[in-house]
Amino acid sequence: MTEPTTDYVQSLARGLAVIRAFDAAHPRQTLSDVAKATDLTRATARRFLLTLTELGYVRSDGSLFSLTPKVLELGYSYLSSLTLPDVARPHLEALAKRVNESTSVSILDGTDVVYVARVPVSRIMTVSITIGTRFPAYATSMGRVLLAGLSGDDLDAYLADADLRPLTVRTISSKDVLRKEISRVRAAGFCVVDSELEQGLRSLAAPIRDHDGTVVAAVNISTQSSRYTATEVRKNLLPALLATADAIHVDLTRL
């Protein structure tokens, strides 16, 4: 084993070891379990767990500890800079060619969605969308899909922080109504938003999941409301969108 250099930060290494102690086989652990898995004393493991809890990366019910979805933030930089866009782009290109509409992938960052990949077919919005463009999650199809992938506690935290300003006359701006809509999206596995972000814009989104089934991103098709009725969106665009989301998921699990 290579000896650590003088620049080696042992506390950081130990903190990361505590995070890595949780996996699919051990999603919830006691303090003793974590100490044993990381070869740390109970006192040291406790300090790291309490620090990670304070930072929002770990939750505890008093006896058992588990990771929170915030841990995904540690991987978002990598996903958004390399893996996810690289994996998604050929699928977006194929989808755009198939339906002749603009396609995108975004991730959730705070209360916004951030575009990490896009294949435009035509200019359908008054603002230009590029990689890094941000929109409020509550008013977008991708945002609602991503919010539907949050835990109850994290969704509560989002709703507490979000400023649900009406962007059009159709924008959902009630937190109670939005919560119900997110529940419907979670049950359906997709979301359609009509003229809530911008008048005349209709978008359809589906979740992209990682190998654990966690929602890490969303893929969408955007079109003008005049091109498709709500029924036609589900009939003509939804099957292709869901197939694309599944294909991206499969490729992500192969990495």
Image (cartoon, rainbow, N blue to C red):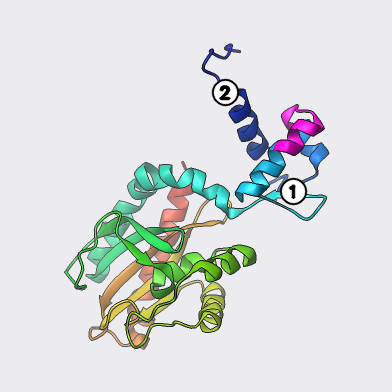
Q: Is residue 57 visible?
A: no
Is residue 54 shown in magenta? no
| Residue 177 x, y percent position in the rendering | 52, 84
Measured in 3D between alpha carbons, the distance from the residue under mark 2 to the one under mark 1, in whole angstroms, is: 25 Å
Q: Main secondary structure of the magenta part?
A: helix
Please report the residue visible at 55 percent of the width from the left and 19 percent of the height from the top. 8
| Residue 164 x, y percent position in the rendering | 44, 76
Q: Is residue 241 above or below residue 87?
A: below
Quickly name the residue at label 2.
Answer: 9
Q: 248 or 217: which is nearer to us? A: 217
Which tag, 2 or 1, sits closer to the chain's start?
2
Q: Which mark is residue 65?
A: 1
Q: Give amino acid for label 1.
A: Phe
| Residue 78 x, y percent position in the rendering | 42, 42
| Residue 42 x, y percent position in the rendering | 81, 33
Count the marks: 2
Q: Secondary structure at mark 2?
A: loop
